[in-house]
Image: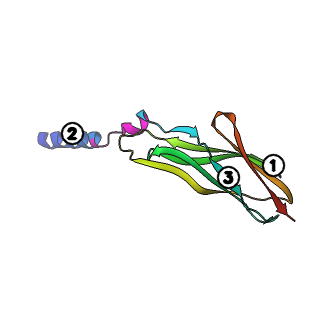
Amino acid sequence: MKSLFVLTVLAVLVVAVSCKKDDTFVSNPPQEFQVKIDSIKLSKNVIWNDTLRARLWGKIGSSTCYQFARYETTRDSFRATVKVIGTYTPASSCGAAIVELRSAIYRIYPVYPGKFTLTIQQPGGTTLQDTTTILP
């Protein structure tokens, strides 16, 4: 009976030790940053009830620890302002690689007839813009 109790206690200890929390995420949480966009191109000849597509190019980072996270957007009927957000997650297993947005598509719907301007907010407060005409 005593040996059964000792075996049960040992089994519980083994399970408790093997379920140890992973400290990597806690000690190295992802860090967000604003991605610098090198160029943008809006689709041309868009009809008012179609989706406007913006193609974006830019470098996110220089290792596999960097990745695209999301777009943050404010807009009205004839303009949109977009901030591109990336994350950096420090880890010892990050490989060397150029992580880029290569013609990443940002979709805008609905659009209305007239001029439409897309503004990309850049790190440091500068902007990058492109304008297209939405056809009736």
The colour scheme used here is: rainbow
Q: CA distance from mark 1 to mark 3?
A: 19 Å
Question: Residue drawn 51% across and 47% down?
Answer: 67
**In the rendered structure, which segment of residues is drawn in magenta?**
18-26
The residue singled out by tag 1 in the image is 76
Q: Give how far apart the Cα atoms at labels 3 and 2 are.
A: 63 Å
Looking at the image, residue 73 sits to the left or right of residue 58; the answer is: right
Label 1 sits on a secondary structure element that is loop
* Sequence order check, earlier mark of 2 and 1: 2
Amino acid type, callout 3: Ile
Pointer 3 residue: 40
- Residue found at x 63% / y 53%: 56
Mark 2 lies on residue:
9
Query: Which quarter of the figure is the N terminus placed in?
Result: top left
- Image check: 71 left or right of 32? right
Q: Mark 2: which secondary structure?
A: helix
| Point 60% across, 56% down: residue | 104
Q: Residues within 10 Å of mark 1 (few under 14, many from 20)?
A: few
Residue 38, percent from left and from top:
62, 47
* Badge nearest the viewer, 3 or 2: 3
Comparing 14 with 35, the one in front is: 35
Q: What amino acid is labelled 1 in the image?
A: Asp
Whether residue 110 is in magenta: the answer is: no
First of labels 3, 2 by sequence position: 2
Three-letter residue code for mark 2: Val
Which of the two discs, 1 and 3, sits closer to the camera? 3
Q: Position of residue 11 (x, y in %)?
A: 21, 44
Q: Secondary structure at mark 3?
A: strand
Q: Nearer the viewer, residue 66 or 110?
A: 66
